[in-house]
Image: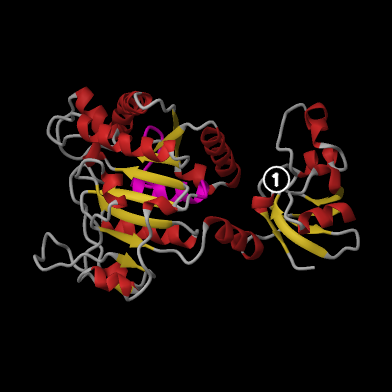
């Protein structure tokens, strides 16, 4: 369903757009053309400082903020003084290797001025699609956020090939938002939202302020990329919106061509909101319960059954039997001592390690396995418990 753009009255006819203050964990995507001047390859320092000021306000209000930042290839081109025009794959990879150093340094310095520590993650398509690598990246993000750092994430253009890459950071940002269980994805763009037709071709094109459901009509509104530095266009933003909203994450497309763009969104600036009917936790649990094939079975004692039904995690001490061949992150069925299914979840240990620590206190994990894994065999956020 689309709410047409006529006035604020249109919003009152349906669900209202959220407020930035409603969200606890945000992913902010910044495109190359916002960060880097297309002529000389210079950073837009004043604009970046204003954005980081907005991020710092959210950070101080106890929000978690992640940044997905393009710009490595654009900065590398400038440093290497490469001519304008399309680059061969190997040239793009080499330019990214040079530019990523400058990009990471820039984010570290501007966040550091606000007293915020930056952490860098470079991801490839496989890192977000292969289960074990996905879990490793997710754990790194969780730990950085726990330490109140701001993860700055980019696609690893130095090793990604055309066949195995996202190719744009809109979809990467959506995948990161899903990975981090973010409740809002902000795409800062050359344009201030989705229009019912390309505004560069139609002077009467109208902004769509609110999209409740992504339909074929919404997808047909997508246009082309807005600048030579941008690899993605509006169609990639719609794809990102589909990924995000299906995973329980709201998304907003807003202009990054203004100072303090996040503050502007909070103040009601023109933008397009994409709403989700769920939230990251419920969407994730629905996925665990119905979309994953179980690879093994954990049988637990009566005390553990009671603990799970009261909302607690499954600890190794409560596991009395381990069956199947599974890897960390696989789905498993959890059964009670009577053999009846209690629930399903994502297990935190390989089958061999689960066998070694079953029935043992979590404090013994290091001495048994030789490394310190999670205290829980299945964390409650990765667990769906059926009704008694």
Q: Which residue shows up at 85% across the image and 54% down it? A: 299
Horizontally, is 110 left or right of 323 in the view? left
Disc 1 crowd rating (10 Å Cα; few below 14, some 14-19, many 20+) is many
Where residue 135 sits, quadrant-wise, is: top right
Whether residue 89 appears in this view of the structure is no
Where residue 32 sits, quadrant-wise, is: top left
Q: Mark 1 sits on what residue?
A: 327
Whether residue 355 appears in this view of the structure is yes
Q: Is residue 81 above or below residue 131?
A: above
Horizontally, is 303 left or right of 197 in the view? right
Secondary structure, mark 1, is loop
Identity of the residue furthest to the left in this view: 203
Q: Is residue 198 above or below residue 95?
A: below
Q: Is residue 112 above or below residue 236?
A: above
Q: Which residues are the magenta region?
A: 157-181
Question: Which x, y percent locates residue 185?
Answer: 40, 51
Question: Which x, y percent locates residue 87?
Answer: 23, 37
Q: Which residue shows up at 27% across the image and 56% down it? A: 268
Question: Which x, y percent locates residue 98?
Answer: 31, 24
Give yes or no for residue 173 being in the magenta stretch.
yes
């Amino acid at each position: 369903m689309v709410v047409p753009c006529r006035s604020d009255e249109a919003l009152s006819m349906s669900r209202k757009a959220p407020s930035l203050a409603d969200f606890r964990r945000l992913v902010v995507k910044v495109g190359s053309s916002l960060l880097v001047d297309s002529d000389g390859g210079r950073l837009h320092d004043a604009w970046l400082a204003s954005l980081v000021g907005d991020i710092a306000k959210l950070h101080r209000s106890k929000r978690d903020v992640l940044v997905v930042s393009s710009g490595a290839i654009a900065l590398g081109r400038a440093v290497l003084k490469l001519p304008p025009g399309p680059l061969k794959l190997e040239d793009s990879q080499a330019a990214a290797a040079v530019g990523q150093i400058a990009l990471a340094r820039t984010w570290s310095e501007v966040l550091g001025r606000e007293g915020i520590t930056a952490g860098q993650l470079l991801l490839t398509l496989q890192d977000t699609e292969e289960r074990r690598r996905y879990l490793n990246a997710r754990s790194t993000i969780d730990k950085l956020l726990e330490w109140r750092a701001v993860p700055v994430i980019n696609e690893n253009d130095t090793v990604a090939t055309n066949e195995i890459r996202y190719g744009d950071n809109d979809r990467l940002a959506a995948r990161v938002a899903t990975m981090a269980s973010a409740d809002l994805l902000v795409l800062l763009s050359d344009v201030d939202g989705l229009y019912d037709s390309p505004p560069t071709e139609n002077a009467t094109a109208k902004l769509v302020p609110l999209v409740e459901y992504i339909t074929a009509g919404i997808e047909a509104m997508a246009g082309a990329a807005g600048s030579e530095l941008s690899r993605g266009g509006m169609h990639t933003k719609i794809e990102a919106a589909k990924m995000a909203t299906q995973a329980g994450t709201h998304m907003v497309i807003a202009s990054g061509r203004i100072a303090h763009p996040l503050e502007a969104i909070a103040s009601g600036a023109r933008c397009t909101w994409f709403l989700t009917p769920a939230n990251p936790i419920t969407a994730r649990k629905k996925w665990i319960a119905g979309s994953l094939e179980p690879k093994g079975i954990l049988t637990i004692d009566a005390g553990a059954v009671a603990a799970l039904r009261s909302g607690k995690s499954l600890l190794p001490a409560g596991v009395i039997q381990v069956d199947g061949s599974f890897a960390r992150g696989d789905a498993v069925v959890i059964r009670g001592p009577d053999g009846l299914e209690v629930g399903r979840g994502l297990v935190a240990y390989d089958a061999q390690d689960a066998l070694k620590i079953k029935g043992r206190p979590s404090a013994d994990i290091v001495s048994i396995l030789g490394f310190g894994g999670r205290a829980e065999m299945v964390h409650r956020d990765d667990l769906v418990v059926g009704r008694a």
